[in-house]
Image: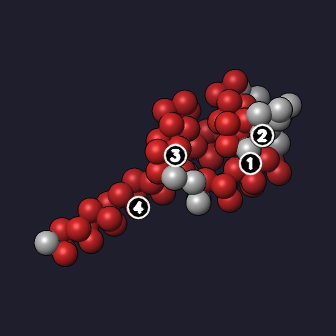
Amino acid sequence: MRIGTALATIRHNMERSQQVQRILDFISSHPESYASLAVCRRALDPGLPQVDRNIIDELADYLHQAPSEEIAAYYSIVG
């Protein structure tokens, strides 16, 4: 039972990491898209006027500690 739980945790962490990377890749490639702006506004600041490299760095820090449900929501916007 413990091994199964450990494997499920590893699988979940890998999937989460892949989702975070996909979100960051999309926003880095498309900083002027409405999807990128929507994710950054929801995660960081509702009044954010645009996405730039500093915002993407802030977002990366934020996403690494954000709840899994929030990651899934952002992933659904850009994925």
Q: Are marks 1 and 4 in contact (CB under 8 Å)?
A: no
Q: CA distance from mark 1 to mark 4?
A: 21 Å
Q: Residues within 10 Å of mark 4 (few under 14, many from 20)?
A: few
The answer for how far apart the CA atoms under marks 1 and 3 are is 15 Å
Number of numbered labels in the structure image: 4
- Dot 3: what SS? helix
Amino acid type at image mark 1 = Ile
Q: Residue at x 18, y 68 (%)?
A: 4
Front tag of 2 and 4: 2
Q: Which residue is mark 1?
A: 56
Q: Is residue 55 above or below residue 9?
A: above
Is disc 2 placed on a helix, strand or loop? loop
Asked if residue 29 shows in the view, the reply is no
Query: What is the C-alpha distance between the residues marked 1 and 2?
Result: 12 Å
Give x and y (percent) for residue 67.
51, 52
Indicate left or right for 62 with 51 as reference. left
Q: Residue at point 82% right, 42% down?
A: 52
Dot 2 crowding, Cα within 10 Å, few <14, some 14–19, many 20+: few
Instruction: Give how far across and how far down residue 73 sits, in percent.
Output: 51, 37
Q: Check disc 2 and give the amino acid type.
A: Asp
Q: Name the residue nearer the viewer: 31 or 48.
A: 48
Comparing 12 with 47, the one in front is 47
Relative horizontal placement of residue 71, taking residue 41 as reference (left or right): left
Residue 61's quadrant in the figure?
A: bottom right
State the residue position of label 3: 71
The residue mark sitting in front, 3 or 2, is 2
* Residue extending farthest left: 1
Question: Which residue in the protein does label 2 denote?
Answer: 45
